[in-house]
Amino acid sequence: MKNKSIYDEIFDKACSVCGKIIKKDIYDQGNCPFCKWKNNFLADKNPNRVIYPNLISLNEAKQLYGQGKPFEPDLDDFVEALFFYSEVQFKYNNMFYEVILASENNEDIIKMNDFNGGNLQTFKTKEDFKNNAKVEGKFLKDIWNDTTDRYWLQ
Ligand SMILES: [Zn+2]
């Protein structure tokens, strides 16, 4: 190929989480087929932060991998992901909910509602959201382990 550049090249490198050899590009991006970590250099540089496209930090992924657990975000990780990307979602009892950062009267707020537009709730701070968000009358923090499909808003 004539115009092949360094940016198209793929290298054999160790996955940042499980250490197995995988394919990474020049930005150290590459999905690990073994542990499912989405490798990227931003996470490598900021191992304690939740950074797209993963919903947990690199160090937490290493810890979960060591315990044989899946890379699922707890409520704190989920809120960190929200502040990284502004839009996240989860599912509970067959209903999807979206959580978004919004602005109201020049103040940042957190809005949560179901995908039908119902159950709208607003929160002034992260802590307000973590402590007071409710789904079907139950505190989200209490039913978090029963939610699924936690992800960037699709
Ligand atoms: Zn891996």
Image (spheres, rainbow, N blue to C red):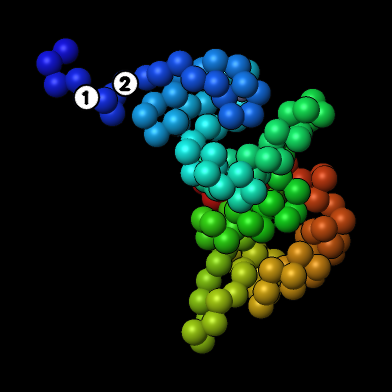
Q: Residues within 10 Å of mark 1 (few under 14, many from 20)?
A: few
Percent of width and height locating residue 114 = 65, 58
Q: Is mark 2 within 8 Å of ligand 1?
A: no
Instruction: Work out whether residue 66 or residue 149 is closer to the camera in this orientation and state it.
Output: 66
Q: Is residue 70 something one can see in this rendering?
A: no
Compared with residue 153, is residue 20 higher up or lower down, i.e. above or below?
Answer: above
Q: Give the quarter of the figure containing the N terminus.
A: top left
Q: Residue furthest left?
A: 2
- Left or right of 77: which side holds 66? right
Secondary structure of the residue carrying tag 1 is loop
The answer to whether mark 2 and mark 1 are in CB contact below 8 A is: yes
- Quadrant in the rendering for residue 132: bottom right
Amino acid marked by disc 1: Ser
Secondary structure of the residue carrying tag 2 is loop
Instruction: Work out whether residue 112 or residue 77 is closer to the camera in this orientation and state it.
Output: 77
Q: Which residue is mark 1?
A: 5
- Quadrant in the rendering for residue 111: bottom right
- Left or right of 136: which side holds 107? left
Percent of width and height locating residue 67 = 82, 29
- Quadrant in the rendering for residue 61: top right
Compared with residue 108, is residue 54 higher up or lower down, i.e. above or below?
Answer: above
| Residue shown at the point (80%, 50%) measured from the top left | 144
Q: Residue furthest top?
A: 1
Amino acid marked by disc 2: Glu
Instruction: Work out whether residue 42 or residue 109 is closer to the camera in this orientation and state it.
Output: 42
Q: Which residue is mark 2?
A: 9
Compared with residue 1, is residue 15 higher up or lower down, i.e. above or below?
Answer: below
Percent of width and height locating residue 65 = 74, 28
Q: Quadrant of ligand 1?
A: top right
